[in-house]
Image (spheres, rainbow, N blue to C red):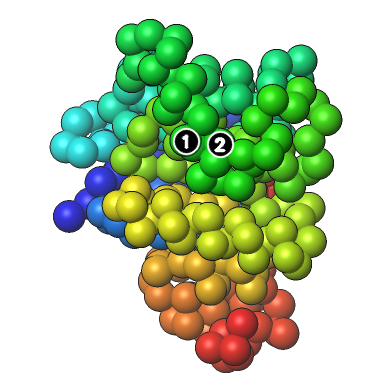
Amino acid sequence: MSLLQYKNVSMHFGGLRAIDDVSFDVGEKEILGLIGPNGAGKTTLFAMASGFLNPTRGEIWFQGKRIDRLTPPDICELGLVRTYQIVRPFGEMSVLENVMIGAFLHCRSAEQARERAARVVERVGLGPRAQQVARTLTLAGRKRLEVAKTLATQPKLLLLDEVMAGLNAVETAEMLDLVQSVRDEGISVLVIEHNMQAIMRLSDRIVVVHHGQKIADGEPEHVASSPDVVAAYLGDQYKGNLAHA
Ligand SMILES: Nc1ncnc2c1ncn2[C@@H]1O[C@H](COP(=O)(O)OP(=O)(O)OP(=O)(O)O)[C@@H](O)[C@H]1O
Ligand SMILES: [Mg+2]
């Protein structure tokens, strides 16, 4: 069953068709990769699903409910949350306090939010840094903190916007493990990523956008061997060679 559905969605900024009649679904417990060149419209798709932009046309549905005219807090409460491509923690607050903000969504007391946040901080591997001021974290730490803030809201679907960008090989592998463990808990994940090896390994299915249009939708091997995708994005090094990625 699908959890999130984009139905013929368009987003126009003046004359620019940032998204043009795009339809796809994200299933229960699915990791769906969203790829495409810079400026293809990936982040715009996230902004619409999370209520930060209203589509010019089309509909977005989440768990059988139309959400494309709801506000970000209402959508978050339904269980759909995003991270940001540019990570901006509340720098002067501690790691734990940043995560508590997410936890407050479903917690009645500060004490309860603190307990939940502490568990999430531990879970993403930031336990030893819980009391550290957020701005002093490394990039890898800040990316983990972004994931922790969303997990604290107890989501059903996470939208992750380039949480592996700028990480080294070890940090990337750790982030892959974290995303997989999130899915193993039953949370669906829609993930934007430019690191091809990582996204191909991680995803059950991949959607490719180019100039605001969907040009492929299928299993990683299928998508990687699509001539349109190779021409638009992957280049020759991936042609027919994805099983080894
Ligand atoms: N609020 C906005 N107003 C005007 N144009 C916008 C706005 N947001 C995005 N765009 C434009 O829409 C297009 C798609 O942008 P988007 O950020 O969705 O791309 P992207 O696929 O996430 O790219 P990247 O891989 O570089 O992050 C770009 O041409 C961008 O300049
Ligand atoms: Mg983007």
State the SS at label 1. Answer: helix
Under mark 1, the amino acid is Arg
> Is the distance from the Cβ of mark 2 to the nearest ligand 2 atom less than 8 Å?
no
Residue 183 in the figure: left or right of residue 130: left
152 horizontally vs 225: left or right: left
Q: Nearer the viewer, residue 21 or 155?
A: 155
What residue did someone put label 2 on? Answer: 121
Q: CA distance from mark 1 to mark 2?
A: 6 Å
Q: Residues within 10 Å of mark 1 (few under 14, many from 20)?
A: some
Instruction: Quickly name the residue at label 1.
Output: 119
Task: Residue 235: give x, y in percent of width and height.
Answer: 71, 77
Does the residue at mark 1 contact the one at mark 2 (Cβ under 8 Å)?
A: yes
Q: Is residue 76 above or below residue 204?
A: above
Residue at the location (26% across, 36% down)?
61
> Left of 184 or right of it: where is 174?
right
Name the amino acid, label 2: Val
Q: Nearer the viewer, residue 150 or 132?
A: 132
Dividing the picture into quarters, in which one does residue 62 lie?
A: top left
